[in-house]
Image (cartoon, helix red, strand yellow):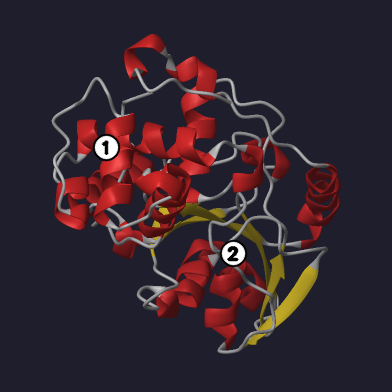
Amino acid sequence: MGLSTDTEAETTEEMIVQWFPGHMTKTRRHMEKLIHSVDAVAEIIDARIPISSRNPEIDTLISGKPRLLLMNKSDMADRSKTDLWVRYFSQKGLRVLEISCRDNSGIKLFVPGVRELLSQKLAKYAAGGMSGRGIRIMIAGVPNVGKSTLVNRLTGSSKIKAEDRPGVTRGEQWINLGDGVELLDTPGVLWPKFDDPKVGEMLAFTGAIKDTVVDIETLAVRLIEVLIDKYPDAIPQRYGIGVEYENFVFEVLERIALKRNFLKKGAEPDTERAAAVLMDEFRAGLLGRITLESPGER
Protein backbone atom coordinates (compact mmCIF):
# COMPACT_ATOMS: atom_id res chain seq x y z
CA MET A 1 0.00 0.00 0.00
CA GLY A 2 2.04 2.91 -1.24
CA LEU A 3 1.63 6.63 -1.40
CA SER A 4 3.89 9.11 -3.12
CA THR A 5 4.97 12.22 -1.32
CA ASP A 6 2.93 14.25 -3.78
CA THR A 7 -0.55 13.49 -2.51
CA GLU A 8 -2.22 15.00 -5.57
CA ALA A 9 -0.90 12.04 -7.57
CA GLU A 10 -2.70 9.54 -5.35
CA THR A 11 -6.36 8.79 -4.67
CA THR A 12 -8.20 7.50 -1.62
CA GLU A 13 -9.10 4.35 -3.54
CA GLU A 14 -5.48 3.23 -3.22
CA MET A 15 -5.97 3.04 0.55
CA ILE A 16 -8.36 0.05 0.20
CA VAL A 17 -7.74 -2.40 3.03
CA GLN A 18 -9.13 -5.93 3.22
CA TRP A 19 -8.90 -7.76 6.51
CA PHE A 20 -10.96 -10.85 7.26
CA PRO A 21 -8.91 -13.51 9.10
CA GLY A 22 -10.29 -16.98 9.67
CA HIS A 23 -11.23 -16.48 13.32
CA MET A 24 -13.74 -13.79 12.27
CA THR A 25 -15.64 -16.32 10.16
CA LYS A 26 -15.78 -18.56 13.23
CA THR A 27 -17.00 -15.65 15.34
CA ARG A 28 -19.84 -14.89 12.96
CA ARG A 29 -20.98 -18.50 13.14
CA HIS A 30 -20.85 -18.40 16.94
CA MET A 31 -22.93 -15.22 16.97
CA GLU A 32 -25.51 -16.72 14.64
CA LYS A 33 -25.70 -19.81 16.86
CA LEU A 34 -25.87 -17.99 20.20
CA ILE A 35 -28.05 -15.01 19.29
CA HIS A 36 -31.17 -17.04 20.07
CA SER A 37 -30.02 -17.57 23.66
CA VAL A 38 -29.79 -13.83 24.49
CA ASP A 39 -32.48 -11.26 25.19
CA ALA A 40 -30.76 -8.26 23.64
CA VAL A 41 -27.57 -7.01 21.97
CA ALA A 42 -25.32 -4.21 23.14
CA GLU A 43 -23.62 -2.94 19.99
CA ILE A 44 -20.54 -0.92 20.86
CA ILE A 45 -19.10 1.55 18.36
CA ASP A 46 -16.30 4.12 18.32
CA ALA A 47 -17.75 7.61 18.82
CA ARG A 48 -14.96 9.05 16.64
CA ILE A 49 -16.08 7.01 13.61
CA PRO A 50 -19.73 6.15 14.32
CA ILE A 51 -20.53 4.82 10.84
CA SER A 52 -17.30 3.05 9.91
CA SER A 53 -17.20 1.25 13.28
CA ARG A 54 -20.65 -0.27 12.71
CA ASN A 55 -20.53 -3.67 11.02
CA PRO A 56 -23.24 -3.58 8.33
CA GLU A 57 -23.81 -7.30 8.88
CA ILE A 58 -24.87 -6.79 12.50
CA ASP A 59 -28.49 -6.15 11.54
CA THR A 60 -28.68 -9.60 9.97
CA LEU A 61 -26.59 -11.33 12.62
CA ILE A 62 -28.68 -10.20 15.58
CA SER A 63 -31.97 -11.35 14.00
CA GLY A 64 -34.04 -8.38 15.13
CA LYS A 65 -33.10 -8.59 18.83
CA PRO A 66 -33.57 -5.40 20.89
CA ARG A 67 -30.40 -3.34 20.68
CA LEU A 68 -28.61 -0.78 22.84
CA LEU A 69 -26.09 1.29 20.89
CA LEU A 70 -23.06 2.19 23.00
CA MET A 71 -20.95 5.08 21.73
CA ASN A 72 -17.63 4.31 23.40
CA LYS A 73 -14.59 6.63 23.55
CA SER A 74 -16.98 9.57 23.72
CA ASP A 75 -14.43 11.38 25.89
CA MET A 76 -12.10 11.53 22.86
CA ALA A 77 -14.80 12.52 20.38
CA ASP A 78 -15.89 15.99 19.32
CA ARG A 79 -18.72 16.93 21.72
CA SER A 80 -20.78 18.83 19.15
CA LYS A 81 -20.58 15.99 16.63
CA THR A 82 -21.46 13.39 19.25
CA ASP A 83 -24.66 15.32 19.93
CA LEU A 84 -25.46 15.18 16.22
CA TRP A 85 -24.83 11.44 16.12
CA VAL A 86 -27.00 10.74 19.16
CA ARG A 87 -29.83 12.63 17.50
CA TYR A 88 -29.21 10.82 14.22
CA PHE A 89 -29.28 7.31 15.73
CA SER A 90 -32.25 8.16 17.97
CA GLN A 91 -34.22 9.25 14.91
CA LYS A 92 -33.42 5.82 13.45
CA GLY A 93 -35.18 4.25 16.43
CA LEU A 94 -32.04 3.15 18.28
CA ARG A 95 -31.50 3.57 22.02
CA VAL A 96 -28.14 5.29 22.45
CA LEU A 97 -25.82 5.50 25.45
CA GLU A 98 -22.61 7.55 25.46
CA ILE A 99 -19.85 5.86 27.43
CA SER A 100 -16.12 6.00 27.99
CA CYS A 101 -14.23 3.00 29.26
CA ARG A 102 -11.26 5.28 29.98
CA ASP A 103 -12.95 7.44 32.62
CA ASN A 104 -15.96 5.18 33.34
CA SER A 105 -18.47 7.83 32.26
CA GLY A 106 -21.84 6.31 31.40
CA ILE A 107 -20.84 2.83 32.59
CA LYS A 108 -23.26 2.88 35.55
CA LEU A 109 -26.11 3.58 33.12
CA PHE A 110 -25.53 0.33 31.22
CA VAL A 111 -27.63 -2.06 33.31
CA PRO A 112 -30.49 0.46 33.79
CA GLY A 113 -30.35 1.09 30.04
CA VAL A 114 -30.65 -2.62 29.31
CA ARG A 115 -33.58 -2.96 31.71
CA GLU A 116 -35.31 -0.02 30.07
CA LEU A 117 -34.68 -1.56 26.66
CA LEU A 118 -36.30 -4.81 27.83
CA SER A 119 -38.99 -3.20 30.01
CA GLN A 120 -41.90 -4.78 28.14
CA LYS A 121 -40.33 -8.23 28.25
CA LEU A 122 -39.52 -7.89 31.95
CA ALA A 123 -43.11 -6.78 32.62
CA LYS A 124 -44.36 -9.94 30.92
CA TYR A 125 -42.01 -12.04 33.04
CA ALA A 126 -43.32 -10.35 36.19
CA ALA A 127 -46.94 -10.85 35.14
CA GLY A 128 -46.20 -14.54 34.60
CA GLY A 129 -44.62 -14.95 38.02
CA MET A 130 -41.04 -14.96 36.65
CA SER A 131 -39.87 -11.59 37.95
CA GLY A 132 -36.53 -13.09 38.97
CA ARG A 133 -35.71 -14.43 35.53
CA GLY A 134 -32.26 -13.37 34.38
CA ILE A 135 -31.29 -11.24 31.38
CA ARG A 136 -28.67 -12.27 28.84
CA ILE A 137 -26.94 -9.63 26.73
CA MET A 138 -24.55 -10.14 23.83
CA ILE A 139 -21.77 -7.57 23.43
CA ALA A 140 -20.97 -7.07 19.74
CA GLY A 141 -18.73 -4.77 17.73
CA VAL A 142 -15.67 -4.45 15.52
CA PRO A 143 -12.15 -5.12 16.89
CA ASN A 144 -10.52 -2.65 19.27
CA VAL A 145 -13.73 -0.77 19.96
CA GLY A 146 -13.65 -1.52 23.69
CA LYS A 147 -15.90 -4.55 24.25
CA SER A 148 -13.67 -6.40 26.69
CA THR A 149 -12.68 -3.20 28.49
CA LEU A 150 -16.38 -2.45 28.96
CA VAL A 151 -16.91 -5.88 30.50
CA ASN A 152 -13.98 -5.30 32.85
CA ARG A 153 -15.44 -1.94 33.91
CA LEU A 154 -18.86 -3.48 34.50
CA THR A 155 -17.44 -6.30 36.60
CA GLY A 156 -14.84 -4.18 38.36
CA SER A 157 -12.17 -6.73 37.48
CA SER A 158 -9.95 -7.97 34.68
CA LYS A 159 -11.82 -11.16 33.87
CA ILE A 160 -11.47 -10.49 30.17
CA LYS A 161 -8.12 -9.91 28.49
CA ALA A 162 -8.23 -6.43 26.97
CA GLU A 163 -5.46 -4.80 24.98
CA ASP A 164 -5.27 -1.84 22.64
CA ARG A 165 -4.98 -4.00 19.57
CA PRO A 166 -7.51 -5.99 17.55
CA GLY A 167 -8.04 -9.71 17.81
CA VAL A 168 -7.31 -10.31 21.51
CA THR A 169 -10.66 -11.68 22.74
CA ARG A 170 -11.03 -15.34 21.84
CA GLY A 171 -14.04 -17.65 21.97
CA GLU A 172 -17.32 -17.13 23.79
CA GLN A 173 -17.27 -15.91 27.39
CA TRP A 174 -20.29 -15.56 29.69
CA ILE A 175 -19.84 -13.05 32.49
CA ASN A 176 -22.21 -12.71 35.45
CA LEU A 177 -22.73 -9.06 36.38
CA GLY A 178 -24.99 -9.93 39.29
CA ASP A 179 -28.57 -8.72 39.75
CA GLY A 180 -29.67 -11.31 37.20
CA VAL A 181 -27.68 -9.95 34.26
CA GLU A 182 -25.26 -12.02 32.19
CA LEU A 183 -23.06 -10.80 29.35
CA LEU A 184 -21.72 -12.72 26.38
CA ASP A 185 -18.49 -11.15 25.15
CA THR A 186 -17.57 -11.98 21.56
CA PRO A 187 -14.41 -11.30 19.53
CA GLY A 188 -14.54 -8.31 17.22
CA VAL A 189 -15.98 -8.99 13.79
CA LEU A 190 -15.12 -7.15 10.60
CA TRP A 191 -16.84 -7.85 7.31
CA PRO A 192 -15.28 -9.50 4.22
CA LYS A 193 -15.09 -6.42 2.01
CA PHE A 194 -15.12 -2.68 2.55
CA ASP A 195 -17.19 -1.37 -0.36
CA ASP A 196 -16.26 2.18 0.60
CA PRO A 197 -12.46 2.53 0.84
CA LYS A 198 -12.92 5.27 3.45
CA VAL A 199 -14.36 2.70 5.86
CA GLY A 200 -11.17 0.63 5.82
CA GLU A 201 -9.18 3.82 6.17
CA MET A 202 -11.14 4.99 9.22
CA LEU A 203 -10.86 1.57 10.87
CA ALA A 204 -7.12 1.61 10.26
CA PHE A 205 -6.84 5.08 11.80
CA THR A 206 -8.42 3.93 15.06
CA GLY A 207 -6.56 0.60 15.22
CA ALA A 208 -9.47 -1.73 14.43
CA ILE A 209 -7.26 -3.16 11.69
CA LYS A 210 -3.80 -4.35 12.66
CA ASP A 211 -0.97 -2.01 11.70
CA THR A 212 0.90 -5.03 10.35
CA VAL A 213 -1.41 -5.17 7.31
CA VAL A 214 -0.99 -1.51 6.35
CA ASP A 215 1.96 0.74 5.64
CA ILE A 216 2.28 2.95 8.71
CA GLU A 217 3.72 5.95 6.84
CA THR A 218 0.95 5.83 4.23
CA LEU A 219 -1.62 5.60 6.99
CA ALA A 220 -0.11 8.56 8.85
CA VAL A 221 -0.01 10.69 5.70
CA ARG A 222 -3.69 9.97 5.04
CA LEU A 223 -4.55 10.85 8.64
CA ILE A 224 -2.64 14.12 8.28
CA GLU A 225 -4.66 14.91 5.15
CA VAL A 226 -7.93 14.22 6.95
CA LEU A 227 -6.92 16.28 9.98
CA ILE A 228 -5.81 19.23 7.84
CA ASP A 229 -9.28 19.16 6.30
CA LYS A 230 -11.39 18.60 9.42
CA TYR A 231 -9.25 19.84 12.34
CA PRO A 232 -6.53 22.09 10.87
CA ASP A 233 -5.27 23.18 14.30
CA ALA A 234 -4.79 19.65 15.71
CA ILE A 235 -1.29 18.97 14.35
CA PRO A 236 0.14 22.48 14.83
CA GLN A 237 -1.05 22.55 18.45
CA ARG A 238 0.28 19.09 19.26
CA TYR A 239 3.62 19.23 17.46
CA GLY A 240 4.33 22.94 17.14
CA ILE A 241 4.77 22.84 13.36
CA GLY A 242 3.10 24.43 10.37
CA VAL A 243 0.94 22.49 7.92
CA GLU A 244 0.73 25.03 5.12
CA TYR A 245 2.07 22.59 2.50
CA GLU A 246 -1.24 20.90 1.90
CA ASN A 247 -0.15 19.50 -1.47
CA PHE A 248 2.98 17.97 0.00
CA VAL A 249 1.70 16.26 3.12
CA PHE A 250 4.67 13.94 3.56
CA GLU A 251 6.69 17.01 4.53
CA VAL A 252 4.40 17.43 7.54
CA LEU A 253 5.43 13.95 8.66
CA GLU A 254 9.09 14.94 8.18
CA ARG A 255 8.53 18.04 10.29
CA ILE A 256 7.02 15.95 13.08
CA ALA A 257 10.09 13.67 12.98
CA LEU A 258 12.46 16.63 13.18
CA LYS A 259 10.47 18.32 15.96
CA ARG A 260 10.61 15.12 18.04
CA ASN A 261 14.27 14.57 17.11
CA PHE A 262 13.50 11.26 15.39
CA LEU A 263 16.57 10.95 13.17
CA LYS A 264 18.21 8.22 11.14
CA LYS A 265 21.82 8.08 10.03
CA GLY A 266 22.88 11.23 8.27
CA ALA A 267 20.40 13.27 10.33
CA GLU A 268 17.59 12.25 7.99
CA PRO A 269 14.10 12.45 9.56
CA ASP A 270 12.85 9.04 10.70
CA THR A 271 9.37 9.32 9.20
CA GLU A 272 8.45 5.73 10.04
CA ARG A 273 8.95 6.37 13.74
CA ALA A 274 7.12 9.69 13.45
CA ALA A 275 4.24 7.92 11.73
CA ALA A 276 3.99 5.33 14.51
CA VAL A 277 4.01 8.06 17.17
CA LEU A 278 1.38 10.10 15.31
CA MET A 279 -0.94 7.10 15.09
CA ASP A 280 -0.41 6.17 18.74
CA GLU A 281 -1.06 9.73 19.93
CA PHE A 282 -4.15 10.11 17.78
CA ARG A 283 -5.57 6.84 19.11
CA ALA A 284 -4.83 7.96 22.67
CA GLY A 285 -6.73 11.20 22.16
CA LEU A 286 -3.65 13.39 22.53
CA LEU A 287 -4.44 15.44 19.42
CA GLY A 288 -7.68 16.68 20.97
CA ARG A 289 -11.30 15.64 20.80
CA ILE A 290 -11.77 14.55 17.22
CA THR A 291 -14.62 12.94 15.30
CA LEU A 292 -13.79 11.98 11.73
CA GLU A 293 -17.35 11.39 10.48
CA SER A 294 -20.49 13.49 10.46
CA PRO A 295 -24.09 12.41 9.78
CA GLY A 296 -24.91 12.61 6.09
CA GLU A 297 -21.32 12.47 4.82
CA ARG A 298 -21.83 9.02 3.28
Query: As shown in the figure, which amino acid type bears the numbered disc 2?
Result: Lys
Q: Residues within 10 Å of mark 2 (few under 14, many from 20)?
A: many
Number of the label disc, if any, that sits on residue 214: none
Q: Tag 1: Cα neighbours inside 10 Å, few (<14), some, or many (≥20)?
A: many
Relative image position of residue 90 (x, y in whole percent)? 35, 46
The answer to whether any part of residue 279 appears in the image is yes
Residue assigned mark 2: 147
Instruction: Pick the residue in front: 274 or 202.
Output: 274
Q: Amino acid at mark 1?
A: Val
User: What residue does disc 1 label?
Assistant: 252
Give coordinates of residue 93: x percent, y percent.
42, 43
| 18 lies above or below 236 | above
Q: Is residue 9 left or right of residue 239?
A: right
- Sequence-wise, the earlier of marks 1 and 2 is 2
Q: Residue 178, position in %: x, y? A: 64, 89
Name the residue rendered at 16%, 39% in the picture. 232
Please identify, in this view, whether the residue under mark 1 or under mark 2 is nearer the observer.
Answer: 1
| Pick the front one: 263 or 162 | 263
Residue placed at 68% from the left, 35% from the top?
Answer: 191
Q: Is residue 37 left or right of residue 115?
A: right
**What is the tally of numbered marks visible in this picture?**
2
Is the C-beta separation of discs 1 and 2 under 8 Å? no
Q: Residue drawn 16% across and 46% down?
A: 241
Residue 20's x, y, as percent? 74, 37
Q: Secondary structure at mark 2?
A: helix
Image quadrant where one finds the N terminus:
top right
Which quadrant does the C terminus fall into? Answer: top left
Residue occupying the far top of the picture: 9
**Is residue 225 at least partly visible in the picture?**
no
- Mark pair 1, 2: CA separation: 34 Å
Q: Residue at x 33, y 13 (%)?
A: 8
Q: Nearer the viewer, residue 180 or 45?
A: 45
